[in-house]
Image (cartoon, helix red, strand yellow):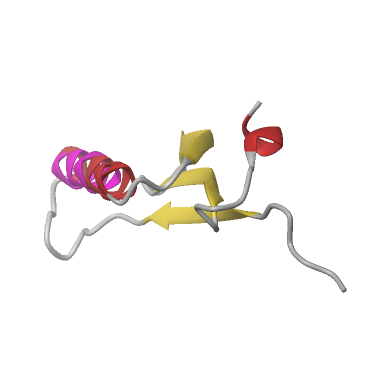
Amino acid sequence: MKRVKAACILQTLVFSQKTEVFPNKEDALSENHREIERYKKTLEKSNTRYQILDEHEEADGSIVIHVRKQLNEKADVNEYFK
């Protein structure tokens, strides 16, 4: 018999520029940062254990983040978050 002892997911999320809504690049970039903060607050509110591995801005103004998230709240995933 097998069972999953621990599991995490690695995600690459792209927060793209909303140029149709914000024609000004600085405003669009600010909105991207606000959207990322809302995403992080959602994770915290749901008590999802996560770790931002990388966050960078692309040439087109999109922001890419690499995140490691806990999948199962009952599993011991400490080894993934050292």
Decide which of 16, 69 is in the foreground and name it. Answer: 69
List the single residue furthest toward the right: 1
The x, y position of residue 77, in whole percent, is: 64, 42
Residue placed most toward the observer, 42 or 2: 2
Rendering coords of residue 60 (x, y %):
40, 49
Q: Residue drawn 74% across and 62% down?
A: 4
- Residue at figure coordinates x 30%, y 44% from the top left: 36
Q: Main secondary structure of the magenta part?
A: helix
Question: How many circles with numbers are drawn on the protein?
Answer: 0
Tell me what residue is drawn at x 55 percent, y 57 percent.
71
Which image quarter holds the C terminus? top right
Horizontal arrangement in the rendering, residue 48 relative to residue 75 (left or right): left
Of the 4 image quadrants, the one containing the N terminus is: bottom right
Q: Nearer the viewer, residue 12 or 10?
A: 10
Q: Residue 12: horizontal and vertical position, in percent?
A: 54, 54
Q: From this viewpoint, which residue is outermost toward the front?
A: 1
Residue 70 magenta-drawn? no
Q: Position of residue 69 (x, y in %)?
A: 53, 49
Q: Residue furthest bottom?
A: 1
The residue drawn where x is 64% and y is 34% is: 78
Instruction: Give left or right: position of 13 versus 11.
Output: left
* In the depicted structure, whether residue 46 falls above or below residue 78: below
In the displayed structure image, the side of residue 44 where residue 38 appears, left or right? left
What residue range appears in magenta? 27-36
